Amino acid sequence: MNQKINQHIAYLMKEKGVNLIISQAKDSNGFVIPHFILSENDIISSVIAINEMRNFFAYLNKQEIKSFKSIGIVCNYFGVKTFFQLKFENQLKDLELFLLIPTDDDFIEITSEKQAEDYLSGLKQSTILVDEELENVKKMSMEERWNYWMKTLELCTKCYACRAACPMCYCSSCTTECNIPQWIPVPASLHGIFEWHVMRAMHLAGRCTECDECVKVCPANIPLNILNKGLHNKISEAFSSDDSSIKYALNFFQPDEKVDFIK
Amino acid sequence: MEDFEPKLAAFVCNWCTYAGADLTGTSRMKYPSNVRILRFPCTGRIDFMLVMKAFDSGVDGLIVSGCHPNDCHYTSGNFHAQRRWVVFKEVLDIMGFDTRRIFFTWVSAAEGAKWAKVVTDAVEELKKLGPYSEFKKILLKKLQFPLDNKTADREIKTEPVIS
């Protein structure tokens, strides 16, 4: 992180009583990993481009991290988006958060929802790559699409890294752990994998911040962002009459909604 | 496919479609016996995972039915269900699942004739489509390791944020 951010981190720890800063660093292989700063001695200067940065908000859902109460987190655009969504879902109660967003040689500090809203309204996320992939999938016939996904999902080992890394997957008891009934079949079979991915997409529908953290951590490189983006498009198209303050489309309805496939 | 008898499940709501199906019977209307009716408290209770479980247990098609909008016993259960189905259908469509096999309908307690028609049409459609062998294939298939499928070299690109 740049000089100014490091100075500010030192200031936050000394003056504001911040106990923990979740910063980012690179390991010896060049992967971006979290760097936990517990005291001023832990501060390191590392160079990570803003587009390379990851979203470590998943840590904030852990009880042992929550117990620090006053936390700073280094993030980018997606971090702010996640912060906004988690606030809406009442997951950041009793937490004092300082979001630090590095810019060229300065940084932006965000502490409230109002500031986050202002920050987000000024920026636009590029979706060219994922749109292209979604387009390619949608162009296929039904059989081709099924074969494409079955071939891709064959590599999935249900390691649930996508769940662990997702800042929106915070339920303390997940459906995958439920075995009466066994919702997600445990054996290495395609129908269990298929069901897990359908379930993951459905539980994130309308809430996903599209930070692509699930794709980045997937050891099988499964393009989960295609599903996330597809649902995002569908929700904004089908429920376009919703006003923009609604953050979870499936928790809401309009009485005059008409759906053409329900006869 | 002449002698193929499809296995059809129906997830119906207790207050409208279940009563509607009852009316079909008491008014002595005939409909195919392929359907297995499962009663739910409300369409809002029909979790999408239950739909997946139905296909896991080997059905060829599924009817999901409940009260018409504004008729829900619990005021808004069917409105919530309606939104969920829009999203659920999109997931299945993107993944290439055959969504022609899921029939979404509204049948009220007075529409005994409509229920008979819904079931007859569904069975007819399923007879045309045949058994859902594609899904049954993955139910039976065990993955053999190591896999010879090597698609994991897909490159991950991060998208920039434009101001």
Image: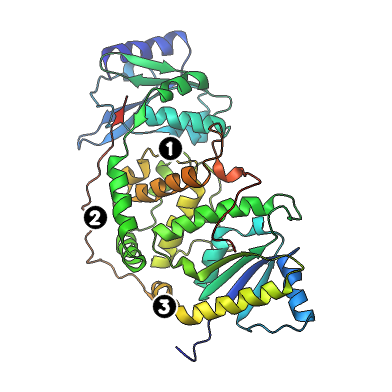
Q: Is residue B97 above or below residue A174?
A: below
Residue plotted at (41% across, 78% down): B133
Name the residue carrying label 3.
B133
Distance in Å between CA atoms under marks 3 and 2: 27 Å
| Percent of width and height locating residue A234 | 46, 48
Residue identifier under label 1: A209
CA gap, disc 2 to disc 1?
A: 24 Å
Image colouring: rainbow
Q: Are marks 3 and 1 in contact (CB under 8 Å)?
A: no
- To which chain does the residue with label 2 belong? B
Identify the amino acid type marked 2: Ala
Q: Nearer the viewer, residue B162 or A201?
A: B162
In the rendered image, the quadrant that contains the C terminus of chain B is top left
Other-residue count near label 2 (Cα within 10 Å), few / some / many at <14 / 14–19 / ≥20: few
Taking the view exactly as shown, the residue that stands out farthest to the bottom is: B3
> What residue is disc 2 on?
B152
Which amino acid type is shown beneath numbered disc 1?
Thr
